[in-house]
Image (tube, rainbow, N blue to C red):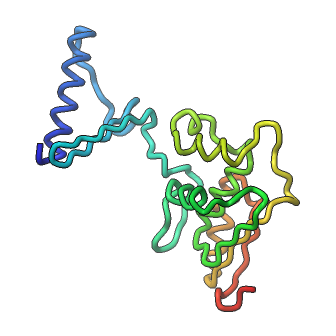
């Protein structure tokens, strides 16, 4: 199938037909808040089908009510944290932190009590990161945290602080207005 949209419609119809045959009735799907979401991508003779048990994308944790130009998604920030090999005892500095997403995601990984249990069950990526950074028998102490965010834009710093507060990790991150050229 050369067109992913056509493949997606055929896939949807097949699922609805199967469920109708099993249940004996037509099913209704809530387009805004479905119980299960399928993502289908096709390219020539390859098809990738993903199943999500959340109607909200994984990259929306809900703390970012404000952001600046070129925001990074939460899942991308988590990937950066993971592939940087940052450890909970290391210093983490974002010299151009913008709205603070990378630092907030790192702090969320450190604070077990702020980890969303639903996300742990829904996302293999989040579970992998949780297992790497959070020990079930110990919670991070505030004096151990070394997470710093800097930005030249005072509005960015305020947005980052507000986002961190909404995420419940504002005490774990130190934000300051600073030019990257003056950072030591």
Kindly identify the residue that appears in the image at 33 percent across and 36 percent down. Answer: 38
Residue farthest left in this picture: 2
Left or right of 21? Residue 111 is right
**Which one is nearer the viewer's eye here, 37 or 180?**
180
Residue farthest right in this picture: 143
Q: Position of residue 139 (x, y in %)?
A: 81, 45
Kindly identify the residue that appears in the image at 18 percent across and 46 percent down. Answer: 4
Kindly identify the residue that appears in the image at 21 percent across and 45 percent down. Answer: 42
- Classify 15 as above or below 71: above
Left or right of 85? Residue 61 is left
Q: Position of residue 90 (x, y in %)?
A: 76, 63
Q: Quadrant of residue 21?
A: top left
**Which one is nearer the viewer's eye here, 120 or 116?**
120
Left or right of 151? Residue 20 is left
Q: Quadrant of the N terminus?
A: top left
Q: Position of residue 16 (x, y in %)?
A: 22, 23
């Amino acid at each position: 199938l050369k067109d992913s949209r056509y493949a997606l419609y055929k896939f949807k119809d097949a699922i609805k037909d199967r469920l109708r045959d099993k249940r004996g009735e037509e099913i209704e799907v809530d387009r805004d808040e479905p119980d299960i979401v399928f993502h289908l991508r096709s390219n020539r003779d390859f098809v990738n089908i993903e199943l999500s048990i959340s109607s909200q994308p994984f990259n929306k944790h809900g703390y970012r009510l404000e952001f600046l130009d070129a925001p990074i998604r939460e899942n991308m920030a988590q990937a950066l944290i993971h592939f940087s090999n940052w450890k909970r005892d290391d210093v983490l500095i974002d010299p151009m932190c913008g709205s603070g997403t990378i630092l907030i995601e790192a702090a969320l990984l450190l604070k077990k009590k702020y980890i969303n249990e639903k996300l742990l069950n829904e996302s293999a990526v989040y579970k992998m990161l949780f297992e790497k950074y959070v020990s079930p028998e110990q919670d991070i102490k505030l004096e151990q945290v070394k997470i710093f965010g800097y930005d030249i834009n005072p509005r960015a710093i305020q947005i980052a602080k507000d986002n961190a507060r909404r995420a419940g990790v504002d005490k774990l991150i130190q934000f300051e207005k600073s030019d990257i050229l003056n950072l030591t």
